[in-house]
Image (cartoon, rainbow, N blue to C red):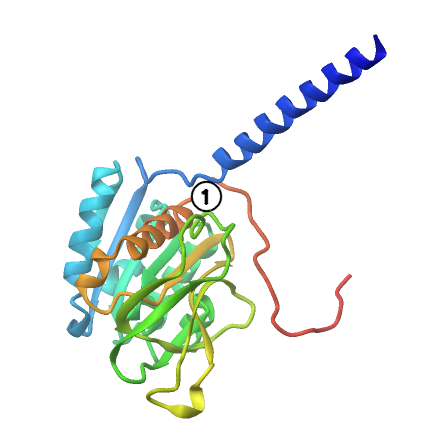
Amino acid sequence: MKRILALKLILLLCIFTNFTTHAQKENLDLPIAKDKKILMVHGGWQGHRPAEFVKKMKKWLEAEGAVITVSDSLGVYNNAELLGSFDLIIQYWTMGKISKTELKGLQTAIKNGVGFTGVHGGIGDSFRESTDYQYMVGGQWTAHPGGEIDYSIHILDKKNPITKGISDYPVKTEQYYMLVDPNVNVIATTTFDGSKDYWNKGAVMPVAWTKYFGKGRIFYFSVGHSPNQFEVEETMQIIKRGFRWASESKYKPFENLIKPVYKGTKLK
């Protein structure tokens, strides 16, 4: 009798464990952008064809039910009430200059929970003179040795919902060499082979990361020099998931994503 009871308990435990595991897997699925209010800001250097990026992403987001506002002016960042109404800001603005009031408006919105995201030079090489902006994003482009070349994207965090299920894959685009905040949550990297600058052989560089700025989630992905890059399935999957993740700042609890590379003093 005891043996039968023990077997029944084991069976129930197995069922419960399977249910819990399945529930956890379901919880890892990122929410779609349905009904999310999204601001898309584009401009700056036209070599990256920012309007084409916005057109492609806008089509996808609207198909998912998002409400899209598009601006080709940084002046939109001066409208505090408007910015605060959005769930996510997607920016593709390479180089250029941002005024102090525009930056303050953008940073205030993000600190209060509006997500911020972009790819390539769209947020990773936007305003070279603004260190406050770079502090917010978590990195800044410095070089792309060899121009558009063949290299591989290495998925570093295989459990992260943005990269889960995606294997390492090849791309042909600019391989960004960046100055990166060593405390951002890196989820994908690339390794330089030294074929252009031999002294960089073996250098590992983040290509995708997540972080917080105040209450706002920030997602960055360095791939995306030209529109053809958005035809690569893995690239688009990472971008879509990253955008969805960043759009949830106002609705999900704050996560401590700080992952220091260097050892420091223990804090109480």
Compared to residue 225, the image places residue 38 above or below, namely: above
Identify which residue is drawn at 34% across, 44% down.
85
Q: In the picture, which quadrant includes the C terminus?
A: bottom right
Compared to residue 96, the image places residue 198 above or below, namely: below
Q: In the picture, which quadrant includes the N terminus?
A: top right
- Can you give x and y, in whole percent of width and height, for residue 181 in the image? 51, 72
Identify which residue is drawn at 44% across, 85% down.
201
Residue nearer the viewer, 12 or 2: 2
Q: Confirm whether residue 250 shows in the render.
A: yes
The residue to which callout 1 is attached is 250
- Residue 96 occupies which quadrant of the picture? bottom left
Residue nearer the viewer, 249 or 150: 150
Q: Confirm whether residue 129 shows in the render.
A: no
Q: Looking at this view, name the residue that lies furthest to the top.
A: 1
- Can you give x and y, in whole percent of width and height, for residue 133 in the image? 40, 71
- What amino acid is at disc 1? Lys
